[in-house]
Image: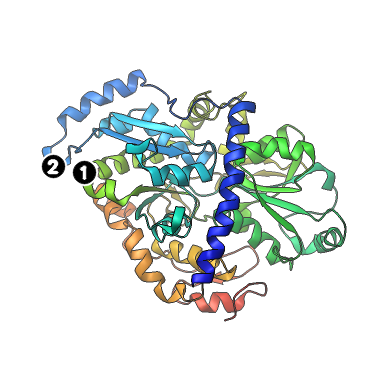
Amino acid sequence: MDEFLNQISRRKFLLTAGVSASAVLLKGCLGNPPDNLTGGTSVQAQQTAQESANLPPEQKPETPKVKLGYIPIIESAPFIIAKEKGFFAKYGMTEVDLSKQASWGSMRDNTEIGSAGGGVDGGQYQMPMPHLITEGLITKGNKKLPLYLLAQLVTHGNGIAIANKHLGKNLSVDTAKSKELFIGLKSSKSPFTAAYTFPHVNQDFWIRYWLAAGGIDPDADIKLATVPAAQTVANMKTGTMDAFSTGDPWPYRIVKDKIGFLAALTAEIWKNHPEEYFALRADWADKNPKATKALLKGIMEAQKWLDNFDNRKEAAQILAKRNYFNLSSPDILIEPFAGKYDMGDGRTINDKSKAPYYWKDEKGSVSYPYKSHDLWFITESVRWGFLPKDYLKNAKALIDKVNREDIWKQAAKEAGIAAADIPTSTSRGVEEFFDGIKFDPEKPEEYLRSLKIKKVSV
């Protein structure tokens, strides 16, 4: 275990150094605004702020202030919409500061600092970052910093983009068809290079699962790298990156800029999959339990608003603003928001069920944080050797400590959410992937045994 933590620390030092340098380049070269630049307060937000004065005393937040970090990809939409449409203010959170982060490394570091030190109180996280931070596995000096995971933000909205130099090489969802390409490049001076935005989390898992399903070992047959999302386009243009796993608008922008194509949407790899999450520092949430629920209510209302497809054009216009995503046009978001993808290789997708969903999807609640999904991320971490095998034995205790679905339920009831929209089980049940593999949260070891490519012996 000590050796494992030492390896984590060494990798983290290299990662932090690289991310810090990338952040400087991003701010200087890509026109990112200062981190503390938020969307201001719209007229609607001012009006709904007045509603907060009528909240019953038992629901009035202890403080109207909180600082939430976010990455400018569509997973962050519930935060931005809740602020811009006045949903936070409606529940008394009238001073929500949304802080754009240059990278996931910055988000982790600012979580450690906390808002009192100029960082953030919580915000948007890939999985299982809240668990890794709680355990002190990716923090400075391996210091444990408890976080509460409070809601899932979205499903879908991610893709695996491939550089145009590989057009016509049969790269698709089924990587078995192009296995010879990967093996051939492995023996050359230029192995296939795939990137993600942070190691050992969602976007790393998506590209690993996609490759391994076709018989390609992501640790042996290709080169993996960490690159901040906003640096994607530049790296694709220079030819230093063959593939990138990240969230919209970046995959679609790569296609629109004719730099690359989409081999797969994550909606094709795992339909209705868990994506990114809302979490808070546990010390902040414990000190401000009513404010924590108020934030959740605002996020839930934003998620429901976003799932009304009639609102998605307006949502794209809000998100595209300079102080949020800083896009040249909201059109980059409008088609993916409708489940319409020009994959860039002649294939098109027009399937509303593959669009991002924020509140409900075909399997039920999106917003509710199912504990069974936490378990999949921990199991997948064990699969790739990111966590020791014994973490599976202790997974339930860790999940129960981090995942506060009980707070989600309390907030939902106070917000008047219909009972039918409040899950009664912490498990969503058996999950199935595009290659036919199934994950039964009651039998995680059986899932590991079914996988041909893995770093753990089961």
Closest to the observer: 330 or 34?
34
413 or 391, nearer to the observer = 391
* Residue assigned mark 2: 58
Q: Give x and y (percent) for residue 323.
A: 49, 25
Q: Quadrant of the C terminus?
A: bottom right
Q: Residues within 10 Å of mark 1 (few under 14, many from 20)?
A: many
Element type at mark 1: helix
Which quarter of the figure has residue 205?
bottom right
Tell me the amino acid under the disc marked 2: Glu
Q: Residue at x 52, y 45 (%)?
A: 104
Q: CB under 8 Å between callouts 2 and 1?
A: yes
* Quarter of image, res 415: top left
Tell me, for residue 290, which label it has, or none. 1
Is residue 102 rendered to the left or right of residue 287?
right
Residue at the image point whose x is 17% and y is 28% from the top: 53
Q: Which residue lies at the image location 44% right of the left edge and 25% below the top edge? A: 37
Distance CA(mark 2)–CA(mark 1): 8 Å
Left or right placement of residue 83 versus residue 377 in this view: left
Relative to 101, 27 lies left or right: right
Q: Which mark is residue 308?
A: none
| Nearer-the-camera pick, 67 or 4 | 4
